[in-house]
Image (spheres, coloured by chain):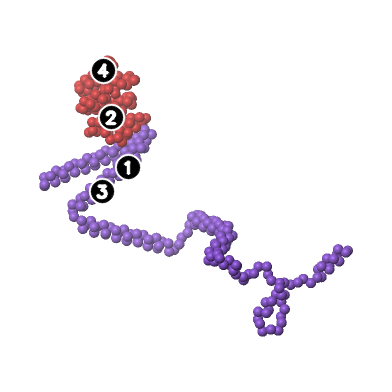
Chain colours: A red, B purple
Amino acid sequence: MNKNIAEIIDALGAHEDISSIGVLEELGTNSPDNEIREYTSRALVRKNIHDSLKVVIINQGKGINDLSPSVAMSTINEILSLKDKSEVIKILDDTINMHSDETVKENARSVKSLLALS
Amino acid sequence: MANVNKVELNLSRKIVNPFKTTRKSTTNPFKFNDFEGNTLDVAICADVFEGTKGVNKLKMISSSVIGSVTKIRKSITEPIVNFANRVKDVITGAWDYAKNTNVEIAGLKNISESIHNAGKGISESISGIRQSIYDSMPPLLHKDIADIGRDILASCSSLISIHNHEKISSAMPVESLEALWKKEISLMAEQETKKIALSSDKSMKAQVA
């Protein structure tokens, strides 16, 4: 992956401005490059706030629901390595209970099981 | 009182003039320069090198000239420094004045226009030369030059990216980071296009061969 893009993603991940999440979602998770999608998803998870976690959990084709197994697994690993998992568990519960797509629900359930085991 | 009389006696004594001459009726013009034995201590017109017959005369003359020059230089160094400093001060003052004063010279506009026109002429001449060289070259070479130009552009872009890379941090506004990211994406897309074009060229050449 381009080093500059990695730096930009890191900078946006560490940014306090909420609008950085929108940029990461628009340019990162929609990128055709698997590496960029993976790196962006991990940055969003590391932010550990409601809006950023929502992007990688409830959206089809992004984060844990990405079609690339490497992207999905990397995102799940990052979620498992979070110190404070309260916000993730809350979003996963909401997804399992309220999401319209069955695949997304299933993935959320799997991640929650992994969290319970970890 | 005795002392006063003594001084008066001394003053009243006739002072001997060493340059006093005695004019006599003679036809010899050099007779007027007879100082009656009262010659000067330093013989101005005497040949100073007269008694040194065994030594190189030229060498002695040159050394005396060098000595004189050194002496002159020593004597004039300080005033020259002062003069130079004064000139410098004057120039500095004039420059400051010119800088802080709006001066409008009637001919200046024309001069600047002339310079501009001259520059334009030179530029056109260079362009003409370049165009003539370009036209005289075979088409294949044109393509190579275009490729070189593209490579230079890519190198410049990467250099700019490196320069920007040093600045990337979370302290930057989100808009700037977004713009940088978009720029990187466009650069990557250009590189991809170039790669595709090169590979298609190679395949075309292979087919022709």
Q: Quadrant of the C terminus of chain A?
A: top left
Q: Residue at x 51, y 57 (%)?
A: B91
Which residue is under mark 4?
A114
* Of callouts 4 and 2, the N-terminal one: 2
* Residue A3: % across, % down: 30, 35
Give the amino acid type for the residue marked by disc 2 in the picture. Tyr
Left of A43 or right of it: where is B98? Answer: right
Q: Say few, some or many: other residues with alpha carbon within 10 Å of mark 4 (under 14 / 14 to 19 / 20 or more).
A: some
Q: Residue at x 22, y 40 (%)?
A: B192
Q: Secondary structure at mark 1?
A: helix
The answer for how far apart the CA atoms under marks 4 and 2 are is 21 Å
Disc marking residue B149: 3
Report in which chain the residue with disc 3 lies.
B
Disc marking residue A39: 2
Q: Is residue B80 visible?
A: yes
Left of B127 or right of it: where is B206? Answer: left
Give the amino acid type for the residue marked by disc 3 in the picture. Gly
Q: Are the residues at dot 4 and dot 2 in contact (C-beta closer than 8 Å)?
A: no
Mark 4 against mark 1, which lies toward the viewer?
A: 1
Q: Secondary structure at mark 3?
A: helix
Residue A106 drawn above or below residue B28: above
Residue furthest to the right in view is B1
Q: Secondary structure at mark 2?
A: helix
Q: Say few, some or many: other residues with alpha carbon within 10 Å of mark 1 (under 14 / 14 to 19 / 20 or more).
A: few
